[in-house]
Amino acid sequence: MNNQNIFNPKVSQDVSSKIVTGLERISEVFKLLLWKKAKHIGLSPIQIQILVFVAFHKSELCNVSHLAKEFNITKPTISDAIKVLLKKEMIFKDHSPTDQRSYTIQLTDVGKDIVAETNDFAAPLKAQVDSFDETQLNGFFDTLSSLIYKLNQSELLTVQRTCYACRFYQKNDNNDYCNLLQATLKSHDIRIDCPEFEEK
């Protein structure tokens, strides 16, 4: 057994290893909260995630291929989840006028109601984050957004829509700038998931 494993509590860890261990613990909290909500409304976690994603993203992103990349799971798994959501009448297929095999997923009124019901599933986690002061929050967010960008650049995170990877983003004299908004961005203005994102 590798005694240098970063998850071995008997090993003196460097700060980077401790952060990775901490992120793993936080991911467990997120999964637990999602599972609790899923069980309560009778859906699986991925079915909830699909509904929430479709509710808040452009229709061209709401297809099987993109959803598989978004959640880093197989197309058959996404297709199975979609079949259940169709059966429960939470979504419908919006077929392309030029190719009936191609479609995007849209929410029905039932689906919209479920999304509204899931709005608070991450509230216990957000409540703890809200307890940090502004300096701590800004520092943490700056580090987190940079980490997401780096994970995407190293192809560990397949999809992201953060400012740093957007064609509208540029660095001006050590300042972040958005050419779409034509504005300098402060650290807290950087987006993790921007609706206007266009890949460089």
Image (cartoon, rainbow, N blue to C red):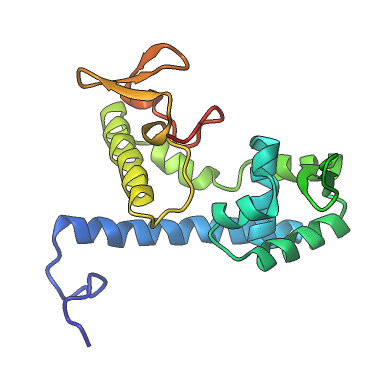
Judging depth in this view, the residue of 160 and 44 nearest the camera is 160
- At 50% from the left and 36% from the top, the residue drawn is 193
Farthest residue, direction bottom:
1
Image height check: is 134 above or below 65? above
Rendered-image quadrant of the C terminus: top left
Q: Quadrant of the N terminus?
A: bottom left
Front residue of this view, candidates 108 and 172: 172
Left or right: 60 with respect to 193? right
Locate residue 21, reporting x and y percent: 29, 62
Residue 43, located in which quarter of the rendered image? bottom right
Expressed as whole percent of the image width and height from the top left, the position of residue 52 reads: 66, 44
Image location (x, y in percent) of residue 80: 74, 66
Q: State whether residue 179 is above or below residue 58.
A: above
The location of residue 143, given as percent across then percent down, is: 28, 40
* Left or right, residue 164 beside residue 74: left
Q: Residue at x 56, y 55 (%)?
A: 69
Question: Splitting the image into 4 quarters, where does residue 141 fall?
Answer: top left
**Count of labels in the image:** 0
Residue occupying the point 22% across, 59% down: 18
Residue appearing at x 45%, y 62% in the figure = 28
In the image, residue 180 sits, relative to residue 16, either above or below, namely: above
Q: Residue furthest top?
A: 182
In the rendered view, tell whether residue 48 sits above or below residue 128: below
- Between residue 177 and residue 132, name the one nearer to us: 177
